[in-house]
Image (cartoon, rainbow, N blue to C red):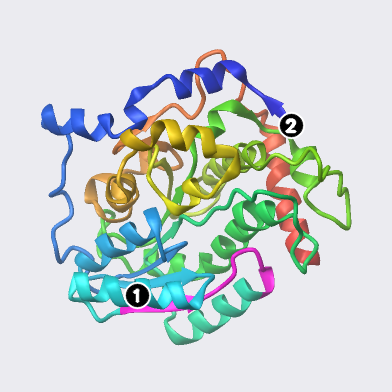
Amino acid sequence: MRWSALGGLQYFLNPCHTAFGPWTARVLGRWRTGDAPAAHLAGRTCVVTGANAGIGKAAALALARRSAEVHLLCRNRERGAAARAEIARAAQNDAVFLHVVDLASVAEIRAFVGAFEKDHGRVDVLINNAAVMPNALAYTAEGLETALATNVVGFWALTQGLLPLLERARASASSPDYASGRVVNVISGGMFSARMHLPTVESGVKAGHGALDREGYSGIALYALHHRCRQILTQRLAASTGLLVSCCHPGWVETPGLANANDMASFYSRMKWCLRTPEEGADTAVWLAAAPQAASVEQNGLYWFDRRPRPAHKPLAGTSPAPEEAEALEAFLNELLLTV
């Protein structure tokens, strides 16, 4: 694992990531809420991962309120069903559907993609929100470290599996700013402290490199690296497809995932009073998914925060990967998916 202390320091010293960011924007008249009209997404099919709580649930609700057909991908059936019922009731939209999928399982992702293509045939918007920060080292039945499986491999497998459906929706769009063929990847600002390091990523494959140390396991370190991977893969996907692909940081948000992460216990106890709400955290992801203003080709593949494109690397942090490192990451994932 390669850290960038300077990148992390610049990130953590920015108070805009707290609730003060949206509060200040409201005071200055910059926190826009009317960019996507209530019926803007009528006829669109949206898929949201990790949608039973927190940012994913808030994003799914916002899309449902805009009259979209919303599909929730959740690991837990009971919590997912409760979220589906709550979203449908709050949005007054019956077109909200639950799919029980463990995004740490490539087999379950493939089964979902196959069934979804047969039953629906298109995806207008995909919001990749789900991510985990395990408290201890564990492996899936497919031999992948749990965080790697969910945050990177599952993320990539789902996106690649749904590409034909996204491209089909994009091809049928009536205008360039139509909310179709959009992929929004929610990422953690912890990536600013992480340099791309493929050997660490590869170490999460138990049957291959398997170099992770149970005693020295750091969920927060892998979380930062995995989200750097997601940012890099956002750029790769934007460059290789005709889709509108973006990644965004939600800010520091009050979520069950944050509250239950041992590595974040100190941060959570000290910062809980000024964390953003899930609705504030989901705002940019929803805007990127729905707003015509987010459809510019020149903005494709960028990193966003509070509805504005931002640099994906901090000054002098040394986190920008070499082109061959980005290529190697994508090649590793594509080869891995052939064997899982």
Q: Residues within 10 Å of mark 2 (few under 14, many from 20)?
A: some
Q: Is 302 placed above or below 70 here?
A: above
Residue 173: which quarter of the image?
Answer: bottom left
Circle 1 packing at 10 Å, graded few (<14), some (14-19), many (20+), is many
In the image shown, does 296 or 226 lie closer to the viewer?
A: 226
Q: Which residue is at a point 60% across and 37% down the rendered structure image?
A: 224
Which of the pair 78/247 is nearer the observer?
A: 78
Which label's residue is closer to the chain start, 1 or 2?
2
Residue 304 occupies which quadrant of the picture? top left
The residue wearing badge 2 is 1
The percent coordinates of residue 63 (x first, y second) are 27, 63
Q: Nearer the viewer, residue 266 or 63?
A: 266
Which residue is denoted by mark 1 in the rendering? 84
Where is 326 relative to 142, above or below?
Answer: above
Where is residue 159? Give x, y as percent: 54, 61
The residue drawn where x is 71% and y is 57% is 334
Give the quarter of the figure containing the C terminus.
bottom right
Q: Which mark is residue 186?
A: none
User: Which of 333 and 107 lies nearest the eye of the viewer?
Assistant: 107
Magenta stretch, residue numbers: 96-107
Q: What secondary structure is found at the residue carrying circle 1?
A: helix
- Does residue 156 sit above or below 41 in this rendering? above
- Where does the image place residue 78, in percent across and percent down from the top left? 46, 77
